[in-house]
Image: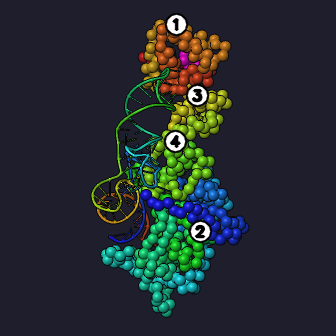
RNA sequence: GACCCCAUCGUCUAGAGGCCUAGGACACCAGCCUUUCACGUUGGUAACACGGGUUCGAAUCCCGUUGGGGUCGCCA
């Protein structure tokens, strides 16, 4: 096990009291924690990104700081507005609110270029005129010789007069060749790499646009980000970014690199590997609070606690208890957590969530009476469902008379027997005459009836359940009867009997 | 290939040298509860990757092996 990082490191302000202005004259005090989530809008918000966002959000909220959003759209070819909206929607659905306006990275390209030019002017960067072919060649020979596959620095010290005409150069960082670069990571501890392993990275492309390495550093610095929480896959990038911070004489933020989430098969969870966007989980009927709880426990722990409310998470979250090994995504556990939060949710809220789903499958609007039955039905239904989708399916019979499935038909078979049918009729007519058609009254009647006739309660309940709900599984049948009301019960029972006779 | 990271039940994890005969949760199995299905509840199966050290004592510290993952773009 790793040694724990020194307590309190990194959450202190870098330059207390200093103010920066950014975007729409938004002043940010530096004496607080500022985290950010910086997705690239080339697709939906996937599960790994969602967890990174959650951790960053939690960390900021925990320390009373700010959580900011930056859209890294400098790849003009692959960035889409649709993806930007999906990210916004995903975060909103998850309940991760960000402070201030989202920063669109591309809008800051001029600032990024300015930094590159400054580095150039200070002799900390240089122009490189290599062609793509040359670079490919370079990588090949490096690999063949067992060296790191990087740029060999051939333009590092060449005179400007040697520049070929008509070839637009890129600007590369003049990275240190000796020594090592160190990252004091809040999750991974100290990680270092020999500078000889790192090449002179491109800061500004030939077309004058900044590379990712440059823009993240400049933006994180300008946005006064104090804590960069991101995926493990950025750990080795961090060495390079460190070199830019050093070259600019800037204090780097603290970093926390959290392990990646893998698919159920242990392979990397990526978009081309079937990873889904958070909206897919929303559509599968998961609740955002269940998702938050699940994602939180994927990599972070608080002793043996499993069910952790967002409020608790905000007051408990820290980087010390983030694990360092990758986790697999397990839909089953998400489901069980979801079932828990479903049981916890209010009937009104659930009815509201489920109504559109039922309306869609019915192809019509729900009447006020149907909607009311739906709400009343939630109590018994919600502890039997794992997702909103299941809940909607199981609630359908409150809106529309069910078709009897095969099992239901079979469950009603006993009523084909004359004596049994008469007994059932006797019970039902007594029930319909009840002054109050409620679950307790009907149940008392049923128990009474079964005692008198020597029938088992189940012999009465199962055929009724089948007739009224169309299924052999449902909430307690007397509760269902109360919610349905005497009239509907009568109608449904009569037509169910008819259906059974016809089917036989 | 080079560099970096990781390694406890099937899965998520607890574990900061003796509290470990390794704990919890999900899943699974069995019992109880019961008008069905669930819920709830009781119990059960199930793990320290391997090999060397250090130490009176190692899941825990060190080294190596193996296995997994990540990064090496004028993508982010």
Letter of the chain that mark 4 sits on in the rendering: A
Q: Residue, x 45% and y 58% (percent of image)?
A: A324
Magenta region, main secondary structure: helix
A384 on left or right of B47: right
Letter of the chain that mark 3 sits on in the rendering: A
Query: How would you rate the neighbour count of disc 1 (Cα within 10 Å): few for under 14, some for 14-19, many for 20 or more?
Result: few
Helix, strand or loop at mark 2: helix
Do the residues marked 3 and 1 share a common chain? yes
Give whichever of discs 2 and 4 has the lower sequence position.
2
Q: Residue, x 58% and y 14% (percent of image)?
A: A444
Image position, residue B34 (x, y; %):
50, 21
Give the mark toward the camera: 2 or 3. 2
To which residue does mark 2 refer?
A220
CB under 8 Å between discs 4 and 3: no
To which residue does mark 1 refer?
A452
Give the mark toward the camera: 4 or 3. 4
The magenta span reads: A489-494
Give whichever of discs 2 and 3 has the lower sequence position.
2
Gap in angstroms between the C-alphas marked 4 and 3 = 26 Å
Using the image as rendered, state which of residue A174 and residue B3 is in the foreground: B3
To which residue does mark 4 refer?
A337
CB under 8 Å between discs 2 and 3: no
Letter of the chain that mark 1 sits on in the rendering: A
């Amino acid at each position: 096990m790793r040694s724990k990082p020194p307590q309190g490191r990194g959450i202190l302000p870098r330059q207390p009291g200093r103010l920066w202005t950014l975007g729409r004259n938004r002043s940010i005090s530096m004496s607080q924690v500022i985290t950010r989530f910086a997705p690239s809008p080339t697709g939906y918000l996937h599960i790994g990104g969602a967890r990174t966002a959650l951790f960053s959000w939690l960390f900021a909220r925990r320390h009373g700081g700010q959580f900011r959003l930056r859209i890294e759209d400098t790849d003009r070819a692959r960035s889409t507005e649709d993806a930007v909206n999906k990210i916004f929607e995903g975060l909103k659905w998850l309940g991760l609110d960000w402070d201030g306006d989202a920063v669109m990275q591309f809008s800051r390209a001029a600032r990024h270029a300015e930094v590159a030019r400054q580095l150039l002017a200070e002799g900390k960067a240089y122009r490189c005129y290599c062609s793509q072919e040359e670079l490919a060649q370079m990588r090949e020979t490096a690999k063949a010789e067992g060296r790191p596959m990087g740029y060999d620095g051939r333009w590092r010290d060449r005179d400007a007069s040697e520049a070929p005409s008509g070839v637009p150069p890129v600007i590369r960082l003049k990275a240190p060749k000796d020594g090592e670069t160190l990252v004091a990571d809040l999750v991974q501890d100290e990680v270092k790499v020999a500078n000889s392993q790192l090449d002179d990275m491109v800061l500004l492309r030939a077309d004058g646009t900044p590379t990712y390495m440059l823009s993240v550093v400049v933006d994180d610095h300008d946005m006064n980000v104090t804590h960069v929480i991101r995926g493990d896959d950025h750990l080795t990038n961090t060495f390079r970014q460190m070199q830019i911070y050093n070259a600019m004489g800037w204090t780097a933020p603290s970093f926390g690199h959290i392990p990646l989430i893998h698919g159920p098969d242990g392979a990397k969870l990526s978009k081309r590997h079937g990873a889904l966007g958070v909206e897919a989980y929303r559509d599968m009927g998961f609740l955002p609070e269940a998702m938050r709880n699940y994602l939180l426990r994927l990599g972070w722990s608080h002793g043996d606690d499993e069910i952790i409310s967002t409020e608790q998470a905000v007051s408990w979250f820290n980087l010390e208890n983030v694990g360092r090994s990758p986790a697999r995504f397990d839909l089953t556990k998400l489901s069980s957590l979801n079932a828990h939060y479903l049981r916890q949710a209010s009937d009104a809220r659930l009815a509201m969530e489920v109504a559109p789903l039922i309306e869609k499958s019915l192809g019509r609007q729900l009447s006020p009476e149907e909607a009311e039955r739906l709400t009343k039905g939630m109590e018994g239904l919600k502890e039997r469902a794992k997702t909103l989708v299941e809940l909607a399916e199981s609630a359908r019979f409150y809106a529309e008379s069910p078709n009897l499935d095969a099992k239901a038909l079979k469950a009603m078979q006993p009523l084909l027997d004359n004596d049994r049918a008469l007994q059932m009729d006797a019970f039902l007519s007594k029930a319909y005459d009840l002054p109050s058609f409620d679950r307790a009254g009907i149940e008392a009647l049923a128990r009474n009836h079964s005692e008198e006739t020597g029938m088992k309660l189940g012999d009465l309940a199962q055929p009724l359940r089948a007739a009224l709900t169309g299924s052999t599984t449902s909430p307690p049948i007397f509760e269902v009867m109360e919610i349905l009301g005497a009239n509907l019960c009568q109608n449904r029972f009569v037509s169910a009997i008819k259906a059974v006779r016809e089917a036989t």
